[in-house]
Amino acid sequence: MALIVQKYGGTSVADPDRINAVADNVAITKRRGDDVIVVVSAMGKATDNLILLADQVSKKQSGREMDMLLTTGERQTAALLTMALHERGIEAISYTGSQVGIITDTAHRKAKILEVKGDRVRESISQGKVAVIAGFQGVSTAKEITTMGRGASDLTASALAGAMNADACEIYTDVTGVFSADPRIVPRARKLAKVHFDEMLEMAGAGSKVLAMRSVEFARNHDVPLHVRSAFTWEQGTWVSNEEPSMEDPIISGVVTDMTEAKVTVLGVPDTPGVSAALFEPLADANVNVDMIVQNTSTDGTTDISFTMPMADMAESESIVQRVAESIGATSVTHNDDIAKVSLVGAGMKSSPGIAARMFRVLADNDVNIEMISTSTIRVSVIIPAGQMELAARSLHTAFGLDSGSDYSAPLPERK
Amino acid sequence: MALIVQKYGGTSVADPDRINAVADNVAITKRRGDDVIVVVSAMGKATDNLILLADQVSKKQSGREMDMLLTTGERQTAALLTMALHERGIEAISYTGSQVGIITDTAHRKAKILEVKGDRVRESISQGKVAVIAGFQGVSTAKEITTMGRGASDLTASALAGAMNADACEIYTDVTGVFSADPRIVPRARKLAKVHFDEMLEMAGAGSKVLAMRSVEFARNHDVPLHVRSAFTWEQGTWVSNEEPSMEDPIISGVVTDMTEAKVTVLGVPDTPGVSAALFEPLADANVNVDMIVQNTSTDGTTDISFTMPMADMAESESIVQRVAESIGATSVTHNDDIAKVSLVGAGMKSSPGIAARMFRVLADNDVNIEMISTSTIRVSVIIPAGQMELAARSLHTAFGLDSGSDYSAPLPERK
C-alpha cells in the first residue's frame, strides 16, 4: 500500500463531466488499496473570470483581497470533487489550504511556503478517507489567506507529498508528459519516459511550462518522484525523479524554447568596479527577474552589458535602467524584444564535453545568428532572432537524435 | 458619529456595475462620518449556479461539502466590494464569517449562531476601516465552515449589528421596503414607513419573504432598528423597530399572503388522549415545519385533525402521516395543496377587539370560504381556496383602509 498525491489541473476539472472522470480515477486508485491525497486547481477559466471581475471594479487590486477572491475557485472544485467521490461510495473530505496548515509568509499573491503541518490530512488518511485539498493557497503567519502564484497547485501537491512522505506525486495535466521539445514548434518531439529533477529544473528555468520550478524543487528536496501525465488519456506519462541517467539514456533530454524574454543592452559602460552592482541592484529591488547576463571584455576602457528578462517586466525596468545608465556614465541603452531563447538540457552533458560546441556548429550550419550564450553544467542556452527560433529548435532536435523514430546519435561524443 | 451595518443582497451586487454602485453608497456613508460594517450576499445567481454544479456531480450532497462550496460566493463579493472601496480611496478589508468569529453549532446548511466574537471587525473599525463581511456563513464549534440557510446574510447582518451595538442595520434589497401587501397581488399596496418587530415577526411567520424571521429576532433581542430599503432607488424604506405604534398609526399594518403551504386532514381520529402527540412528534422528528393545527370537537367519539405545512415537505411527511394514522386507528387521510393562507397583521389588534370578526365578515361578503383559522394577539390567519386568494387579499386590504391614497378607517372599532 502506497501513499499517492494526485494533482488535477484546471482543464482536468473544467466541468462536471471532467470532475466525474477525475472522481472515477481517484476511486480506482483508492480501491487498488492506496491512500490518496488529491490537490485540485480551479475549474477551467474560473480564475481568469474572477480576475476579469476584479478588473471591472478595481485598478489597484490589493493582494490580500485578490487572494480572498481567487482562493474560492479551488475550494469550489475541492467540494465538488469530494461530493463526486461520495457518490462513488468513497469516503472523502475537502480542505482549504488554511485547514491543512499550509503556512506561508505574508507576501500576498506570491507567498512562499514556510511549513506544511498537515495534521487534518494525516487524520483523514488514517480514517481511510481521501483528502481533497484546494491547491494554490495557504494561510500566512498573520492568519490571512494567501496564494502562491499562478500554477502553484503543483507546489501545493509536491509540498504535501514531501510533508506526508508520499510514495509518488502524480501531476495530471492537459499534456501527456514532458516532451523533448514543444510539439507545436518541433513536430517530431517525443514524450520522455523519465527526466532527472535537475534536468526538469533547468527546463523550467529555460522556459518550459510543464512544471513550475518551485514544485520541482520541493519534490527534489523531499525526494518524491513526480509523475506528469494526462487526465484525458490516463496513459503513462513522464517520471521526474532523482534517478541517475544510465548508459542507455540519451545525453540530451530536450530542446526548450522561450519567446517571453526581451534583451537590454547598456552601451559604453565605463569599465570600473561596481558598475554591474549599480545596474542590477535596483532591478533586483524592483523584483525584475533578470535571466542571462553577458558582459564583453573591455577594449577601450568601456564595455557593453547585455541582459535578458521577462518582456512583462520591460516597462518597469526601462526607466530604472535608463536612470542608472546615466548615473554611471554609459553611452546609451538599447532593447530588443524580437528575440528567442533556445536551450539544450541534458544530465548527460556533465560527462560529455563538447555539447556546446556541437550546438553552435549546428546553428552556424543553419545560418542562425547567436546573440548571447549562457551555460550551466547540464544546459546550454542561446539567444537568437525570434524569426529563427523554429529552424534552430528543429535542427537541434534532429542533430541531437531526439526526433521520434530516431535512435541515431553516432556523431555525438561517446559517453564516458 | 454612528455605527451602521449595511447588508446588500444578491441582486444588489449582481454584477460589477452594481458592486460599484454599492461601493459609492458605502463611501457616502463613511464620508458622512459614520463607521460602517458591510455584509454581502453572493452575486446574483452565483449560489444557484453552484448548486446546479453540485447537482451534476452528486445526489447525496454532504452538508459539510455544500457549505465549503456555497460559502465561496459571498467571499467573492466581499473581496470585490472591498477592492471597489479601495478604488474610491476608502480603507476597507474583507472577512469571512470564520475570520470575524461567527461561531455556530455543527448543523451544516442550517447552522445556528452560538456567538459572535467580532474581534477583527472591532479592530478594523477602530482603525477607521470599513469591514466587509461575507454573509450567510460561520465556523462551527468543530472548526468546520458552516452556512445558516438561504437568506441568512440578513441574519449575519443583524447578529453583527447586535454584537457590535450598531445604531442601525440597513437591509438593502430589491424592493423599496415592507409593503401593506404583496404589490403583485394587491396593486394598491403601499410601503409602510415603520413596522414593529413583533409585527415583522408575525409577517415573516405568515409568509412574507422580505426579512427572515431569525434575523428579525436577533435585531429585536438586541434592539437594533432595521431599515429595509432598495439598493436600486436608495429611497427611504421601512424602519423595523420596537417603537410602539402611536394613535395615528393604522390598527392593521398589512395583509400577508402565502401559497407555499399544503393542508393535511386526518379523518375519524379516536378522541383519546395522546393522539395529537402520536401524530405530530414523528413529524417534528423529521423536521417538518407544521404551521397551523385545527382539531374539531368530538361528537361521535372521533375527531378530525387538520394541519398545514410547507408543500416542499409533503412527500416526506405523507408516508409518516399515513403510518401514524393507521397506528392510531384513524379512518383516512386527505390532503389538499390547492390552498392559500391570508393573514392580517397589526400591533394595534391588541387594543382593538373584533378585528377577526370583521375579517370573517369581509370574506363572507365576498363569498370566500374559510377552511381553517388561526390567531395570535396581533395576527389573524385563514386558510382559503387558492383560487380566491387575490379576491380575499384585495378585499381585506381595502376594507381595513390600507389602499394607497386611502386614509379611511372609520368602520373600524376605535383605538382604546
Image (spheres, coloured by chain):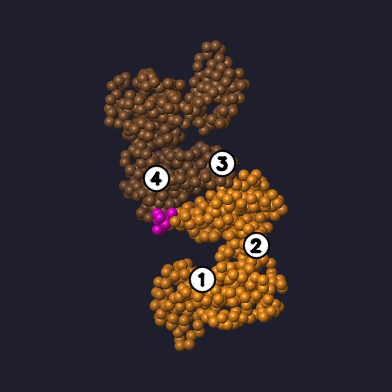
Chain colours: A brown, B orange
Q: Position of residue A272 (x, y in %)?
A: 57, 15
Choose between A249 and A120: the one closer to the eye.
A249
Amino acid type for the residue under numbered disc 1: Met
Q: Taking A367 as reference, is B103 left or right?
A: right
- Residues beneath discs 3 and 1 located on the same chain: no
Kindly check if marks 2 and 1 are in contact, taking CB atoms under 8 A apart as contact: no
Q: Position of residue B300 (x, y in %)?
A: 46, 88
Q: Is residue A147 above or below residue A317?
A: below
Amino acid type for the residue under numbered disc 4: Ser
Task: Give residue B185's quadrant in the image.
Answer: bottom right
Which chain contains the residue that carries disc 1?
B
- Residues beneath discs 3 and 4 located on the same chain: yes
Residue B59 falls within the magenta-colored stretch: yes
Q: Position of residue B326 (x, y in %)?
A: 39, 78
Q: Taking B32 as reference, is B305 left or right?
A: left
Q: Which mark is residue A12?
A: 4
* Residue at x 65% of width, y 80% of height: B353
**Magenta region:** B53-60
- Residues beneath discs 2 and 4 located on the same chain: no
Amino acid type for the residue under numbered disc 3: Gly
* Residue at x 32% of width, y 28% of height: A402
Choose between A140 and B397: the one closer to the eye.
B397
Q: Which mark is residue B237?
A: 2
The nearer-to-camera label among 3 and 1 is 1
Residue labelled with disc 1? B259
Which chain contains the residue that carries disc 2?
B
Residue A343 falls within the magenta-colored stretch: no
* Residue at x 69% of width, y 71% of height: B249
Q: Taking A243 as reference, is A114 left or right?
A: right
